[in-house]
Image (cartoon, rainbow, N blue to C red):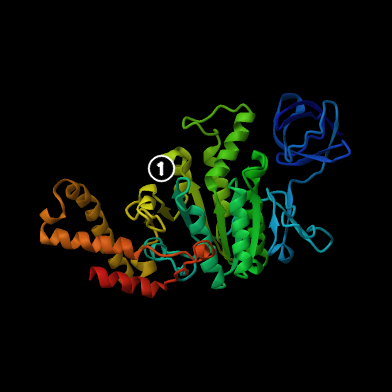
Amino acid sequence: MAGSIVSIKELIVKVQFDDDLPGMQELVVVQNDHDTMLLVDHFEADGVAFCLNVRSDQRLSKGMTVDRTGKSIEVPVGEPMIGRILNALGDPLDGGAPLDGKDIVRRDIMQVPSRTTNFSGSKPEILETGIKVIDFFTPFVKGRKIGIIGGAGVGKTVLTMELINNIARGGAGLSFFSGIGERIREGHELYVTLKENDLLKNTCMFFAQMNENPVQRSLVGVSAAAAAEYFRDEQKRDILFFADNMYRYIQARNELSTILNQTPSEGGYEPTIFSDVKVLQDRLSSNQNGSITSVQTIYVPADDISDPAVQFIQHEMDSVIVLSRKVAEQGVRPAVDLNLTTSSLLTPEIVGERHYVLSVRVQTLLQKYDSLKNIIAIIGENELSPADRADYAKAKSLIQNFTQNMNVMTRHNGIPGDFFSREETLKSIEEIVV
């Protein structure tokens, strides 16, 4: 039996179902000649379903009939979507032909694959990014997660674009990009960059930029993850998954929580923040079929790295690259805070003894440099001991050594980008510290 709309408030549409209740996260359709889609969020007493107006359709009114579909949101998966840009609902955004028809496979984005054995492999495989500071401090290991943390305007998106450009060019699997609540301009620039470098043929893109409602912004990461799972499990492919920006995902979930009148958590975010982060991150995992290696940018509101949402997401990462405004103001690019950047993968077993020993020496020098800066500001560099002056000079050389030009910025500034192999990176560091 069909339901009936009993109230409408912003994106929340209450629908009365007397029997044959729809399932959670099921799509229901309003019979208003436009087939307006609503997504069931939860129920209250007496069969009233709280539904989300997925497309912000205003052509609704009380009393309209609502029918069940028996399914949730489904997005197209498989070869036809490679090189295309889709929204959270699987609709093309690139002006190309619709992805429908009998030969198109669609996947329920809410259907989580059965839990399988985590991908381990006999030996961790390191992917070279060509970016010195990443290859040295946060090795890019197949099947793991890297977080790029920073405030507005410090270079998160540029660094992500450079990673896509460098890694995808090496043919290391299929790339996915999920744009969550970021600027439309950035999405367009990424598309143009990939097209110019002939990388679209190995890339699938999902976008719900900041002009979209919080329903679509909260779903686009899930849609991209569902499509990536299909290629991993059905086609046994290795996936490179880029998400920009994970904080915007939490922000969208928080907006929906406010609309639903949920009591916020102690940190001011939605009460389900822990499960929201955990459910999505668990889907970006690897198994015996293939791997999903993810790079996720995390916006830091007001440059406060202790923000609860930032901390929740950060704890899911194997490596964390921290971009600093202070470093950016010094003209260093990428603007990485070398002392706050950490990785649990920087071990002799993964990177080798040579790399590990070098990293310990470099981190010691950088920490000493940080403490000496305050002393120098008071008494001057000449008052330091010869050993301290030598270490201070080495640290300054290291910071300069980790600065490099980005390939994706060449068309903006005319400066050719740099690409360094891991061996070249280690040699350049050895020349300074040994």
Residue 347 falls left or right of residue 34 = left
Q: Quadrant of the C terminus?
A: bottom left
Foreground of the two, 295 or 420: 420
Foreground of the two, 344 or 327: 327
Reading the image, the residue beneath label 1 is: 305
Q: Position of residue 213 (x, y in %)?
A: 67, 39
Residue drawn 55% across the image and 41% down it: 250
Q: Position of residue 432 (x, y in %)?
A: 25, 69
Foreground of the two, 248 or 49: 248
Residue 301 falls left or right of residue 206 = left
Q: Quadrant of residue 424?
A: bottom left
Relative to 191, residue 313 above or below: above
Residue drawn 41% across the image and 40% down it: 304
Relative to 385, residue 152 above or below: above
Q: Position of residue 76 (x, y in %)?
A: 74, 57
The 10 Å Cα crowd at callout 1, few under 14, some 14 to 19, many 20 or more, is some
Q: Amino acid at mark 1?
A: Ile
Residue 344 falls left or right of residue 382 = right
Q: For the view shown, which residue lies furthest in the front direction? A: 414
Relative to 291, residue 86 above or below: above
On the question of residue 276 being in view, the answer is no
Foreground of the two, 42 or 338: 338
Disc 1, SS: loop
Residue 401 falls left or right of residue 303 = left
Count how many numbered circles sit on residues in the image: 1
